[in-house]
Image (spheres, rainbow, N blue to C red):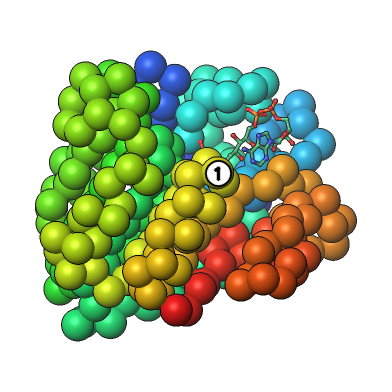
Amino acid sequence: MIYENAKLIKKTKLKENVFSIILSCKGIEKKATPGQFANILIEGFTLRRPFSICEIEKNQISIVFNVKGKGTKKMASWQEGKNVNIIAPLGKGFAPLKKKEKILLVGGGIGLAPLLCLCKKEHNITTLAGFNSRKDIILKKEFEKFGDFLVCTKDGSLGEKGLVTDYVKKYVEKYGITRIASCGPNPMLEKVLKIAKEEKIFCEISLEERMACGIGACLCCQHILNENSNKKIVHVCKDGPVFKFSP
Ligand SMILES: Cc1cc2nc3c(=O)[nH]c(=O)nc-3n(C[C@H](O)[C@H](O)[C@H](O)COP(=O)(O)OP(=O)(O)OC[C@H]3O[C@@H](n4cnc5c(N)ncnc54)[C@H](O)[C@@H]3O)c2cc1C
Ligand code: FES
């Protein structure tokens, strides 16, 4: 659905070059599910920019974004009260959580944001978050409301030293994990998926590809998925961004 005038209700600077924005979108809570995304029009650019929905509330969604290039730099300059043109919700999200599942959320950097949407108090949630350094940590307080928040940093400045993928197996065993949901850079996701397959755990990954239309029309977001020994061509905006793998 197009929201031509989604009002920017609140903008928060979380870190240098990382912002959270809340947009007012009437009735969106009835349509959006965790893991779906919004395609946002930025003045001066023809192509919309895709962003995962971080939180869904009544009549509003939040998005957390990194300033990466010209479009996100412009977004960072937006002021509260601005009307934003967005198409949302788009794509396929995560499957609903079941009460008995023990879920491990594995997030790399800004990839942590869409996983927050999955968190509900009644579920058993552990989060494993990887950042380059302690100065990059985001959303700690938000995730801690739902369970253990385990951190690792590339430079070892906080938590365990290394990449999240170095610790997935350890925490799968420690917490008796039965399901994994992950978002971050694609090479990280490939490793998470490999571990999930070895451990025979249901796993969902939220992939990123460069997008244009966001609705399956231009075919520019093609991705080759390795399903067991078969290669499958998918379009991330329409078939994903969340892809499911059963053991
Ligand atoms: C499904 C999905 C969800 C995403 N969720 C988030 C999020 O929650 N937070 C966040 O910070 N970023 C997210 N991204 C990445 C975000 O879309 C890019 O960082 C953003 O488009 C960069 O725009 P730019 O104009 O600043 O950069 P530029 O590099 O100037 O953009 C040039 C073009 O490349 C495209 N592009 C550049 N990087 C990416 C990328 N990584 N993925 C897709 N297209 C890209 C832009 O859309 C634009 O068309 C997501 C991407 C996808 C596909
Ligand atoms: S972005 Fe156009 S088909 Fe996916």
Taking depth in this image into account, of 163 and 104 the one nearest to the observer is 163
Asked where in the image residue 58 lies, by quadrant, the reply is: bottom left
Would you place residue 159 above or below residue 121 in this image? above
| 113 with respect to 185 (left or right) | left
Q: Is residue 190 above or below residue 151?
A: below
Residue 187 position in % (x across, y down): 55, 44
Give coordinates of residue 222: x percent, y percent.
78, 56
Give the quarter of the image for residue 198.
bottom left
Q: Is residue 224 visible?
A: yes
Left or right? Give the position of 195 relative to 160.
right
Q: Position of residue 223 (x, y in %)?
A: 73, 56
Q: Nearer the viewer, residue 51 or 7?
A: 51
Give the labeled residue for mark 1: 187
**Does 179 sit above or below residue 127?**
below
Q: Residues within 10 Å of mark 1 (few under 14, many from 20)?
A: few
Q: Residue shown at 20%/33% (left/top)?
A: 160
**Residue at point 65% right, 64% down?**
226
- Residue toward you, 171 or 99: 171
35 vs 234, left or right, is: left
Task: Identify the secondary structure beneath mark 1.
Answer: helix
Instruction: Name the residue type under label 1.
Output: Pro
